Image (cartoon, grey):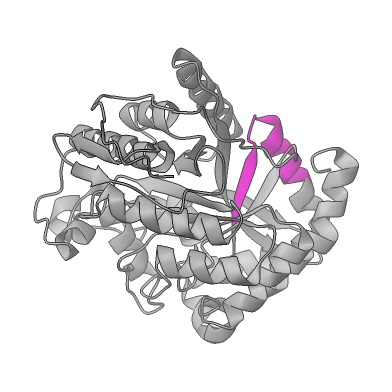
């Protein structure tokens, strides 16, 4: 309801939770999320996808994506999380070069699913205004019955900034300062009964009001994947989910990052759930999964991985990295982990093996496995029909 009386919003560094944090739990010890379904070949940087592009690369095409989302919803997946992209990494496989944007993907998903939470990924530093995202998000949340959420990304890839006319990428601290203002203003717009005046360093808004209000009370769930100390601090002050991707993927790294997230959140008298990016190859047997893994690694798309590595390092040319070797300057192990899952936690094997790996991951304190699949139309049903029943017997799912 618009009361008509304008309030002057305070500009400050969070935490800021008017009305408190939204309910985050879906009642599962370990939530399962379908990840990166909305972009070409998802988390798979391998030329193997070219052997059957409809199956392995273009599952983001509608109605293929519609079928995949409906199936995930029916099988009991908890969330779908979109991969945010404004340009891919090229190479022969054209890794992530095409895909559905955050608003289209969430809106279309809302229509064809009943239970999945719908998380959009938005790079807030790319000249979006908080009013844009607050309004778009509130509308999707309204029509979906409170199922929309937002993965807030400050922006990292210099080439993506250039696409929006920003020739110099802001330094990390400035990007998070911008994100702080962005999120604070969105929270005002989602929860205020009166029009909002906001005058920050990076964003201004005069008489801003969002109607309809989000269906979820008091606002949509926010996610952030900041990995640096500044990123972790921002995530635990302003977001509800912290999304972790330890570069080496050791179990002790997950334990350390989970503990760090809860320690940071407690400092601000907040609670966070912790999600982990995963990548899965599910086959009937471990031996068959090993064969698939070997095939994907053998066909790893060197050019795409090199471009990805440059983007993550914030560089634009081979000269910036030195002369890249056969492993794109990453080392063999890390090169293969980028090719198969962008260094996410690897869930490779039979249904029994995948279930056990998920159990072990959950024991580190992870609340949500956010999973990308090489062959999603095959693997999503296997996860729902074969892995989830095992997880229930283990007490990892209800």
Residue at 78% x, 65% y is 382
Residues 194 and 70: in front is 194
Q: Position of residue 64 (x, y in %)?
A: 60, 81
Residue found at the far front of this picture: 4
> Does any portion of residue 45 appear in the rendered image?
yes
Residues 5 and 159: in front is 5
Residue at 15% x, 61% y is 162
Task: Tell me where residue 326 sits by quadrant.
Answer: bottom left
Q: Quadrant of the N terminus?
A: top left
Residues 68 and 257: in front is 68
Q: Position of residue 164 (x, y in %)?
A: 17, 62
Write the start and end of the magenta stretch as one range.
Answer: 356-371
- Rendered position, 226 above or below 300: above
Residue found at the far left of this picture: 167
Asked if residue 365 is among those painted magenta in the image, a careful observer would answer yes
Q: Is 266 left or right of 310, judged from the image as shown?
A: right
Asked if residue 37 is among those painted magenta in the image, a careful observer would answer no
Q: Is 325 left or right of 199, judged from the image as shown?
A: right
Residues 7 and 90: in front is 7
Residue at 51% x, 81% y is 61
Q: Position of residue 246 (x, y in %)?
A: 48, 38
- Rendered position, 186 above or below 252: below
Q: Quadrant of the C terminus?
A: top right
- Rendered position, 296 above or below 58: above
Residue at 52% x, 84% y is 53
> Does any portion of residue 374 appear in the rendered image?
no
Q: How many marks?
A: 0
């Amino acid at each position: 309801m618009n009361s008509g009386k304008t309030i002057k919003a305070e500009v400050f560094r969070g935490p800021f939770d008017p009305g408190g944090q939204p309910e985050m739990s879906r009642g599962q010890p370990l939530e399962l999320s379908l990840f990166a379904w909305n972009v070409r070949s998802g988390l798979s940087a391998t030329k193997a996808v070219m052997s059957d592009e409809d199956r392995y690369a273009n599952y983001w095409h509608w109605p293929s994506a519609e079928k995949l989302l409906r199936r995930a919803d029916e099988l009991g997946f908890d969330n779908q999380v979109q991969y945010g992209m404004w340009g891919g990494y090229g190479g022969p496989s054209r890794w992530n070069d095409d895909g559905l944007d955050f608003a289209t993907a969430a809106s279309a998903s809302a229509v064809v699913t009943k239970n999945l939470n719908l998380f959009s990924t938005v790079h807030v530093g790319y000249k979006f205004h908080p009013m844009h995202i607050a309004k778009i998000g509130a509308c999707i949340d309204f029509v979906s019955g409170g199922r929309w959420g937002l993965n807030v990304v400050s922006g990292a890839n210099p080439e993506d900034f250039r696409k929006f006319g920003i020739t110099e990428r802001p330094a990390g601290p400035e990007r998070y300062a911008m994100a702080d203002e962005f999120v604070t203003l969105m929270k005002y717009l989602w929860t205020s009964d009166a029009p909002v005046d906001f005058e920050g360093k990076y964003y201004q808004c005069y008489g801003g009001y969002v109607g309809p209000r989000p269906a979820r009370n008091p606002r949509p769930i926010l996610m952030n994947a900041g990995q640096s100390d500044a990123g972790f601090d921002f995530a635990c002050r302003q977001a509800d989910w912290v999304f972790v991707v330890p570069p080496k993927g050791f179990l002790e790294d997950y334990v350390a990052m989970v503990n760090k997230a809860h320690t940071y959140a407690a400092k601000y008298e907040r609670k966070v759930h912790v999600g982990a990016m995963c990548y899965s190859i599910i086959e009937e047997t471990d031996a068959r999964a090993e064969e698939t893994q070997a095939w994907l690694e053998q066909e790893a798309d060197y050019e795409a991985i090199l471009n990805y590595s440059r983007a993550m390092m914030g560089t634009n040319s081979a000269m910036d990295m030195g002369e890249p070797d056969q492993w794109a300057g990453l080392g063999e192990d890390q090169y293969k982990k980028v090719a198969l899952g962008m260094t996410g936690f690897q869930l490779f094997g039979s249904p029994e093996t995948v279930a056990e790996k998920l159990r072990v991951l959950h024991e580190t304190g992870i609340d949500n496995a956010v999973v990308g699949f090489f062959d999603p139309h095959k693997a999503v049903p296997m996860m729902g029909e074969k892995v989830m029943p095992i997880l229930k017997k283990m007490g990892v799912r209800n």
